[in-house]
Image (cartoon, rainbow, N blue to C red):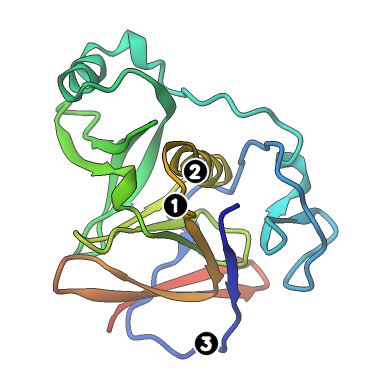
Amino acid sequence: MSRYLSNRRGTQAQKVRFDEEAIPDEDEVGGTLKLRPSDGYITEDQEPFMGVKVRRKASIHRDFLGDYVDVPSRPYLMKILEKQGDKKVLFADTVLKFTSTGKMKRRILLVTDFAIYIVDPESGALKRRIALAAVEKLCLSELSDNFLAIVIPTEYDLLMASTRKTEIVTILVDATKSQSDYELDVLFSNRFEYNATSELVKEVQFEQVEAGVKTRISRK
């Protein structure tokens, strides 16, 4: 079983502010995860994910579909997978990927039973391939937002936003478990750090406000 860690800490004012208005409201598909009550930031129309993460009740009872971009109909994706020797696609969807400068780029995220792929949908170019064995942990807030950080100690980390975050986390945890005895950590905290590059550390901070969730990204 993977380790689900919660780290509740106070927030501090940040120099750089990112408002989540550019990202659609969470509309995640559900799975077979066991849910239990949590005492943090839950309203009547929400339930916790993995006992900690807040998600909307409407998203809980939906089935995982996996491929949301119809990979077989996109020759450039099939060519990338064939070149890398990957055949089994566990997840495919369009996400927003954050660059080291804080810009958002629309990318196709592919997850196979061996690796994570980041592909530019416009050029069809493979931008990055990350072996599942290189992933150390996943970082999420405890609130109802769309952010997910994938931590890769031997390289640099990946920060993205997806309306199907729950499905991505579940698939990554299950895929890592099935390929090895390694237990992928899932850290829930309303403030976490990630390496935007090998030499640049940033902090993401989440705050529950009346209008929803306010997100700030700043240099450390």
Crowding near pointer 2: few (<14 within 10 Å), some, many (20+)?
A: some
Question: Is residue 70 placed above or below 218 in the rendered structure?
Answer: above
Q: Residue at x 72, y 50 (%)?
A: 56
Q: Which residue is mark 3?
A: 11
Question: Is residue 123 placed above or below 172 in the rendered structure?
Answer: above
Numbered disc 1: secondary structure: loop
Which amino acid lies under the numbered mark 2 shown in the image of this protein? Lys
Question: Is residue 107 placed above or below 91 in the rendered structure?
Answer: below
Question: Is residue 28 placed above or below 38 in the rendered structure?
Answer: above
Q: Residue at x 57, y 24 (%)?
A: 65
Please state, as top left, top right, bottom left or bottom right, where the C terminus lies in the image.
bottom left
Numbered disc 3: secondary structure: loop
Numbered disc 2: secondary structure: helix
Q: Which residue is mark 2?
A: 177
Identify the mark nearer the N-term, 3 or 1.
Answer: 3
Front disc: 3 or 1? 1
Distance between mark 1 and mark 2 Cα atoms: 6 Å
Q: Return the residue nearer the eye: 218 or 129.
A: 129
Distance between mark 3 and mark 1 Cα atoms: 32 Å
Identify the mark nearer the N-term, 1 or 2.
Answer: 2
Residue 188 in the figure: left or right of residue 85:
right
Please tell me the numbered disc located at residue 125: none
Q: Which residue is mark 1?
A: 182
Label pair 1/2, CB-CB below 8 angstroms: yes
Q: Return the residue nearer the eye: 164 or 116.
A: 116
Crowding near pointer 3: few (<14 within 10 Å), some, many (20+)?
A: few
Image coordinates of residue 31 in percent, x first then y, are 68, 36
